Amino acid sequence: MSNIKIAIASDHAGFSLKEELVLFLTGKGLTPGNFGAFSAESADYPIYAKKLCINIQNCEFDCGILVCGTGLGMSIAANKFKGIRCALCSEPVSAVLAKQHNNANVLALGARIIGADMAKAIVGAWLGAEFSGARHEIRLRMISGFEGGGE
Ligand code: RB5
């Protein structure tokens, strides 16, 4: 796990949890790329979703975590980016399946929905899981076909 290049970003609502997750990831031997926000001052979540997703698209990072109040805005924004498969999770079972079945390369979390311990459990579960491939690969290719407005 320690060679995964992971990025993390938040808006103001997710700032505090994001900082806790930076420490959590560092404790796991990772060096997360922190794309802000860097304070709890009001900030627009799409700006931070964009920064993180572009860095994943450019292969600067393998995967990312986005934190806002509910996780909803971040996940909606992230899923507009080609090649990004963002899963909003509030418990670890979904996080494992988001990797196994959906190969989610971005995890969205809601800082106003879950606590820090739950967020860490979700992140740990997601990072520890592996994509199952096979039939799921075929389905993800179908989804990729929708990018750019496919049928
Ligand atoms: C900010 O107040 C809030 O709207 C944002 O953090 C997020 O929950 C949006 O989906």
Image: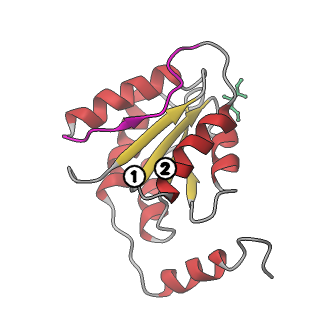
Along the line of sight, the residue nearer the viewer: 95 or 81: 81
> In this view of the protein, which residue sits in the foreground, 64 or 16?
64
Measuring from the top left, give residue 143's x and y in whole percent. 65, 75
Is label 2's Cβ within 8 Å of ligand 1?
A: no
Task: Find numbered disc 1 in the image and state the secondary structure of the residue it sits on.
Answer: loop
Q: Position of residue 31 (x, y in %)?
A: 27, 38
Q: Amino acid at mark 1?
A: Phe
- Report the amino acid beneath label 2: Asn
Q: x%, y% of residue 60? A: 40, 52
Q: Which residues are magenta?
A: 29-40
Q: Mark 2 — residue?
A: 55
Magenta span includes 48: no
**What secondary structure prevails in the magenta region?**
loop
Residue 58 sits above or below residue 50 on the image? below
Label whose residue precedes the other's in the sequence (1 or 2): 2
> Is residue 89 in view from this perspective?
no
Callout 1: few (<14), some (14-19), or many (20+) C-alpha neighbours within 10 Å? many
Magenta-drawn stretch contains 36: yes
Q: How is the image coloured?
A: secondary structure
Q: Position of residue 59 (x, y in %)?
A: 42, 58
Left/right of residue 2 with respect to residue 92 in the rendered view: left
The relative height of residue 78 versus residue 33 in the rendered view (above or below) is below
Q: Are marks 1 and 2 in contact (CB under 8 Å)?
A: yes
- Tell me which residue sits at (45%, 54%) in the image: 95
Could you classify mark 2 by the number of other residues whose Cα lies within 10 Å: few (under 14), some (14-19), or many (20 or more)?
A: some
Labelled disc at residue 61: 1
Residue 55 visible in the shown view? yes
Q: CA distance from mark 1 to mark 2?
A: 6 Å
Q: How many numbered marks have been drawn onto this rendered protein structure?
A: 2
Q: Is residue 129 left or right of residue 87?
A: left
Q: Quadrant of residue 122?
A: top left
